[in-house]
Amino acid sequence: MAYNIDEYCNHFRKLLESQLLRCERMENESGRCDFSKKEKIVIGVIGGDGIGPIIVDEAKKVAEKLLCEEISCGKIELKVIEGLTIENRLEKNCSVPEDVLGEIKSCDVLLKGPTTTPKGGTMESANVTLRRELDLYANVRPVAIPEKNIDWIFYRENTEGEYVLGSSGIEVPEKLAFDFKVTTNAGTKRIARAAYEYAKANGKTNVSIVTKANIMKKTDGKFSAICHEVAKDYPEITTEEWYIDIMSANLVNENIRHKFQVFVLPNLYGDIITDEAAQLQGGVGTAGSANIGDRYAMFEAIHGSAPRMVEEGIAHYANPQSILRALVMLLRHIGLTKKAQKLEDALNLCNSENAVTVTGNKDGATCKEYAEYLISKL
Ligand code: IPM
Ligand code: MG
């Protein structure tokens, strides 16, 4: 049987050209936005799908309470952005419709609820589109379990690896399928730099590079080599190298896990291991996630839109803590350190008191009850 190999090769040629252009754009980047120089900061608030609008609504009320002075003097604007819903995206057959993207780009930072990705088909995840369109290259996910002496922070590369061409694979029907994984020098340098700079600024002494470079020789091999190269600029920090399989085991190994501090890793491994880490902390409903670029940043819950909770009629029992932790990171990112600390302290207090506990089910408090209790502590 003859295959149309030229057609597949042409497809690959286009991908290669587009990725080389992306490399050039990254090489010409202009550097981080300085929020202290901005007269006004616009925070876009996006509900998303499923439990998204429920948790984001409560987070917005918390933000309004916390930032009432900044909002009333015009230093901060909370701008609600509609239309990033699965219904609208399916209707327009577009993962992030043009007009919605325009609204998003008029903001500085975003607080975003989870969005649903249709299984199969060709529609890309809205998250992946936004991370690419806004060039949010660092996915920063802290996980802390103080009573076990665990204080981790994951620097997950967020724009390339398995994700960048995840919807552009090749399939020869009834025969085989290819997906592509892309690792670039510039893309790796910037995530490595972000991880080491964080370590340096926060008195961390240890960074773990996590790959599967024994198997993914070209891509992970490059990731590892470039991280080591960047590490040379931080001689005071110890660099360790681990493979993702054993690192997944390490996170549940009580004898060593507390020794890890900062992790830097490619996109897909970062996706998987941060869910594991969040579960150890108390569930994916408890962890926040920051997507940071030089111009924009987007803050969200680590989890998805939980369609099952909606189907079972328990969506309003969703835990808002993850999006609230994301709000803490957002406030720190725009320089409102004291406000961030205030919210973080209130969240920790609510957790230690255990007076209002969200379980994600009817036996627990509702999302709204938790948020109201939290606001009373601010
Ligand atoms: C995450 C999510 C996303 C990812 C999905 C929603 C595309 O799992 O932010 O970890 O895979 O990155
Ligand atoms: Mg994930």
Image (spheres, grey):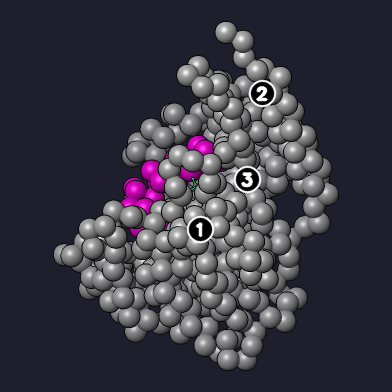
Q: Which residue is mark 2?
A: 8
**Residue beneath the point at 46% across and 68% down:** 47
Residue 152 is inside the magenta segment: no
- Disc 3 crowd rating (10 Å Cα; few below 14, some 14-19, many 20+) is many
Q: Nearer the viewer, residue 268 or 120?
A: 120
Q: Which residue is mark 3?
A: 159
Evaluate if marks 3 and 2 touch, with contact meaning CB atoms under 8 Å apart: no
Magenta residues span: 266-288
Numbered disc 3: secondary structure: loop
Q: Quadrant of residue 228?
A: top right
Numbered disc 2: secondary structure: helix
Q: Cα distance, mark 1 to mark 3?
A: 26 Å
Residue 16, percent from left and from top: 74, 31
Q: Which residue is mark 1?
A: 91
First in sequence: mark 1 or mark 3?
A: 1
Does mark 3 have its CB less than 8 Å from ligand 1? no
In this rendering, which labeled residue sits more in front, label 3 or label 2? 2
**The residue positioned farthest toward the top in the image shown:** 1
